[in-house]
Image: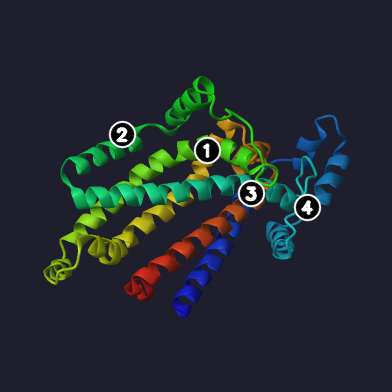
Amino acid sequence: MINFVLRRVASGLVLMVVISVLTFGLLSIPDTDVGRHLLGPAAPQEHVDAHNASLGLDQPIWVRYLDWATAALQGDLGRSWFTSEDVSTTLANRIPVTLSLMLGVTLVTAVVSFTLGVWAGVRRGLVDRLVQVLAVVGYALPGFLITLVIVLVFAVQLGWFPAIGYTALTDSPTGWLATVTLPILSLSIPAIAGVTQQVRSAVIDVLHRDYIRTLRTRGLSSPRIVFRHVLRNAATPALTVLGLQFVGLLGGAVIVEQIFGLPGVGAMTVQYTVRGDIPMIMGVVMTTVIVVVVANLLVDVLIGWLNPKARVS
């Protein structure tokens, strides 16, 4: 198991290096006079050149990358070219918002999907058809439409939750829960639809295997068979899909944070990408990669624990 984890960690580190090189290179390709963009068209050329030199833009791209990577390894992601904000501080203030959404959606998706998927796979019949219809509808509806309906019903008409704004968990746990409930609900519906179908299919497949019939002939109760044997074997493909859903939430968070006015990473990504603020964009990209690598590592470790065969794959 230790070798399995070490292999996954090593592959994650390689992925981080490759993405950092590609991202830095792609961001540096556009021939944009950053100093002129920052100082304005009326600024003297010598001031523009001096400003570009202060940003290190007069250096070759490989030198600039090595300088950035060396500082990043020490925890210094630089400062914004436009606002002089410290990138690390800005991300530290915004990451908890996005992570709270992603972890909340993952938890809700896991609980609801496994409950519905196991229920449909074991009971079959009308229950199975009903769950499949709900899953297809939830997966087919556009995400922005689900979000708008949720806001209109629960925030505008019923007034149960605030439509916009964010309260930090440290300021008020109840206020934090109220501000993240609707965003989590809007992101969870399509995620639940996809994972539920996977759980259902995996449960049905496991139930038809020979060793399950053998367990039944030995007189084991159905709940014991389902929770001790079926669910353990059916969880592997479902966890894989759940991990992919977690990564996909990064894209959905951009739209949801904009709609609900949440000060998360998704909202700032759009703002600084339009400006072409390379230090801030690199900070966002690398933070996202770290989150993805850690999430995939946890999923792989859990799958390896449930299914020892996966450790040698």
Instruction: Residue at 65% x, 45% y: name it.
Output: 169
How crowded is the residue under tag 3: few (<14 C-alpha within 10 Å), some, or many (20+)? some
Q: Which residue is mark 3?
A: 95
Q: Position of residue 122 (x, y in %)?
A: 21, 53
Q: What kind of element bears circle 3?
A: helix
Q: Amino acid at mark 2?
A: Val
First in residue order: circle 4 vs circle 2: 4
Tag nearer the camera, 1 or 2: 1
The residue furthest top is 157
The reply to whether discs 4 and 1 touch (Cβ–Cβ < 8 Å) is no
Any mark on residue 181, and which? 1
In percent of width and height, residue 15 lies at 53, 63
- Residue at image location 64% in from the left, 36% down from the top: 166
User: Is 31 situated left or right of 142 in this image?
Assistant: right
Q: Earlier in the sequence, mark 1 or mark 3?
A: 3
Determine if residue 285 is in view: yes
Could you tell me if the residues under marks 1 and 2 are in contact, i.e. CB atoms within 8 Å? no
State which quadrant residue 82 falls in.
top right
Separation of disc 4 and disc 3 at Cα?
32 Å
Quarter that holds the N terminus: bottom left
Q: Residue at x 72, y 58 (%)?
A: 64
Identify which amino acid the numbered label 4 is placed on: Asp
Q: Which residue is mark 2?
A: 137
Q: Earlier in the sequence, mark 4 or mark 3?
A: 4
Q: Which mark is residue 58?
A: 4
Q: Which residue type carries mark 3?
A: Ile
